[in-house]
Image (tube, rainbow, N blue to C red):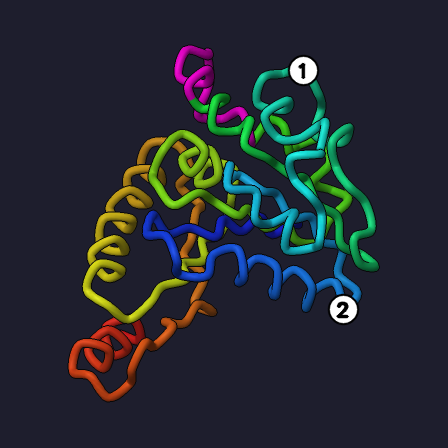
Amino acid sequence: MTDIIAVVNQKGGVAKTTTTIHIGVALAHLGKNVLLVDLDSQRHLAEGFGIVADRIEQEMSDVFEGAKCIKEIIMPNLRPHLDLAPSNVRLADMELTLVNMRFRESKLKRALEPVSSRYDYILLDCPPNLGLFTVNALIAANKVLIPMATHFWSMLGVSRLLTSIEAVKHEANPTLKITPCGRAIPLDRHTPWSHRCILDTQA
């Protein structure tokens, strides 16, 4: 069975894309077939591999629009065993269009179905919000990974995210689980708040 992992936190700057890239490359290095999917219009996932995202002609907005199948926009073999479904700034406009589409929350799940059997892992790099692309990721995934930093706003964001995850589980994806492999990124282990954050995430 393919593990589809949504890398989620509505707080920006907590290393979602860095986490996605490093885990994806590590799994591919172990011989696992991996697909990275960029759901963030900031397009950092492609640029993390040295690709100029604004020059990409076919990307995830075409998939959500229905103009392309995901297999048509996948960039194969960025590394051995590692493929990428990229995005660029056009994805920001696509979210506005997606609001008026039927079955908008499950677009990604249906798009991944024809290719999921090719991969051992599919990692979904989500935008820093709880909008439609993040909801699509939570419905398509069977696991959630939450990178976070040890400061107040990050912890507050995680609390709200957990509420959203429970709502998605209840309404659309009851098998969704939070993976235990995530760790907090300490800004300063010696501050009381950072220490509390680390203890709370370990609990």
Q: Give, as a three-letter code, the residue at label 2.
A: His
Residue 106 painted magenta: yes
Callout 2: helix, strand or loop?
A: helix
Q: Residue furthest bottom?
A: 190
Residue 66 quadrant: top right
Please, is residue 91 above or below residue 143 in the view? Answer: above
Q: Residue furthest left?
A: 192
Q: Position of residue 51 (x, y in %)?
A: 71, 47
Q: Which residue is mark 1?
A: 67
Q: Are marks 1 and 2 in contact (CB under 8 Å)?
A: no
Q: Which residue is mark 2?
A: 29
For marks 1 and 2 on the same chain, the one whose residue lies earlier in the sequence: 2
Q: Which mark is residue 36?
A: none
**Crowd tier of the residue under label 2, counting other residues whose Cα lies within 10 Å: few below 14, some 14–19, many 20 or above:** some
Magenta segment: 96-108
Q: Nearer the viewer, residue 171 or 16?
A: 16
Q: Position of residue 21 (x, y in %)?
A: 61, 59
Q: Report the residue at 53% width, 24% height from top.
A: 107
**Crowd tier of the residue under label 1, counting other residues whose Cα lies within 10 Å: few below 14, some 14–19, many 20 or above:** few
Q: Nearer the viewer, residue 151 or 166?
A: 151
Callout 1: helix, strand or loop?
A: loop
Q: Report the residue at 40% width, 41% height from top.
A: 174
Q: Split into 4 quadrants, where in the image is the C terminus?
A: bottom left
Q: Report the residue at 79% width, 65% height from top.
A: 31
Residue 22 quadrant: bottom right
Q: Is residue 18 left or right of residue 185?
A: right
